[in-house]
Every structure is written in structure tokens, then in C-alpha cells.
Amino acid sequence: MTHGFDAAKAVEAKWTPKLDLWLGAKYVVTPATDAQEWTGIDRVLTARHHAASGSRTIEYKCDELAAQTGNAFIEITSNDVTGRDGWARSCSADWILYYVTPDEAILLRPDAVRGQLDAWEGTSRIAKADNGDYRTLGLLVRLEDVRAVAEAVLAVPGDQPPDLWPAVGDCTHQGGRWNRGPGHFVCADCEELCEVVPPACRHEAVYYRRDEDDVRCGDCGATFKRRAVRKR
């Protein structure tokens, strides 16, 4: 990851097919548009067997040196001439997949990375990659410190791809809308999944309102108890 821009792109091009294949077992993997790539998105993922709708975005960072050095290259400045922020500060994807080749995937939330930058800057050496007219700056952060803030550390391809949707029970949208799915309600804001108890109302395609611990049908007024279930 301390390579120059062109070399780093070549490394990502080399390993991206392996990541696409691994994630493709669980998601429909779609390459990002040029506009999305500029904001730090490499792939758009849609779940193949998920009760919730929508998609998740992810940025790949592939590092061929980390396994030997024990350090991750956390880019803080992409261009030291223009001052453009590095991916650690600017990534707009839902997730960052930091891939320590050949077989370790560290799944990170961008906000978690940004929240650690001040601490890492105090303990990590700055590395500089020469790109001719400008340099890219990054922190050499110990892999163990990066793993400590990760959502998951997985073997590729040994482990199953991660669940990129929020964990059940995370929803705090008390007044949010709930879409009725087959036997379940799905929060329209964060996609938390809850089981219908009992399954009395048959208005499958309408939105529901959250009422404290219940969900109320907007058409017939039927009220259902919420009971969190693990998403598949």
C-alpha cells in the first residue's frame, strides 16, 4: 500500500477478482460508477437472500506488504499538493474492506477509522509514496490496532462473507416506517428486521408505523408485537 498511485491500482486490479468472487457467494456485486469511485466506492452489493431491500457500498484496499511488515497503510492525504484527503478521511462507502493479501479481510466502518486517526497519528510513523508531481501520505498502523476497531476479521475464501446490514436490535427509529415482508416487518430507514406476532393483517405492500413496542398497519389499524429475529 505504500506504492505509488499506479502501482497501488495494479495491486487492487490483481486482487479485486478474488474479493468479488468471495463476496459474490452472498451478494450481487456491481462495479461502482466513475462518480462513485471518486468518492471512495468500489462496489455496490445487493444481498441475494435478504429480507430487507436496498444495497451496501464498499471500498477495497488491497495491501501486499502488510503481512510482512505487520503494518497497514492508512491513507490520510491522497495528494499533498492539492491537499485532497486520503481514503481514511474521505471514504463515503458504507464499509471498507482492508485486504491483507493473500487471505485476510479486515472489515471496517469508515467512521470507526476516522474516529481513530488522532490516536493513530500519535503512535504511528508517516509513510510517503512518491507519485512524481505529488506524494501520498499514510500512517503505518499496526495491524493489531486496525483489527481492534474492525467489525470482523475474516479468512478469504475460508470464511463466509460478512453480513453488511445492521445487527437486529440496532434500530432506534421509534416513529419510523416499517414495510411488511413475508412474515416480517423491515424498517424503511435502517432495515432492522422484526417478526410479525401474530400474522393477522394481510396488507403486504403497505407501510406500517412504529408505536412504542408495536407496529401498526396504516390501512386497517391492526397492531402487531415486535419481536427481533436474526436476519438471514
Image (cartoon, rainbow, N blue to C red):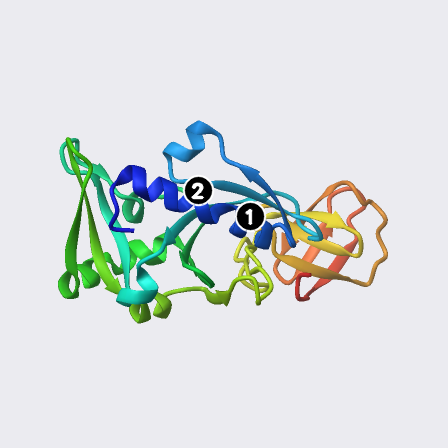
Q: Looking at the image, is mark 2 or mark 1 earlier in the sequence?
A: 2
Location of the C terminus by quadrant is bottom right
x, y percentage for residue 22? 58, 55
228 relative position to 6: left or right: right
116 relative position to 44: left or right: left
* Neighbour tally class for label 2: few under 14, some 14-19, many 20 plus, Cα within 10 Å: few
The residue beneath circle 1 is 20
Q: Nearer the viewer, residue 216 or 144?
A: 144
- Residue at 69%, 49% in the rendered image: 48
The residue beneath circle 2 is 13
- Work out whether 107 lies above or below 148: above
Q: Nearer the viewer, residue 16 or 146?
A: 16
Is label 1 in a helix, a strand or a loop?
helix
Residue 121 visible in the current orientation: yes
x, y percentage for residue 47? 65, 49
Q: CA distance from mark 2 to mark 1?
A: 11 Å
- Residue at 23%, 57% in the rendered image: 117
- Residue at 24%, 42% in the rendered image: 4
Q: Amino acid at mark 1?
A: Asp
* Neighbour tally class for label 1: few under 14, some 14-19, many 20 plus, Cα within 10 Å: some
- Work out whether 24 lies above or below 34: below
Give the quadrant of residue 13: top left
Q: Amino acid at mark 2?
A: Ala
Give the quadrant of residue 72: bottom left
218 relative position to 25: left or right: right
Q: Nearer the viewer, residue 135 or 4?
A: 4
- Residue at 86%, 56% in the rendered image: 200
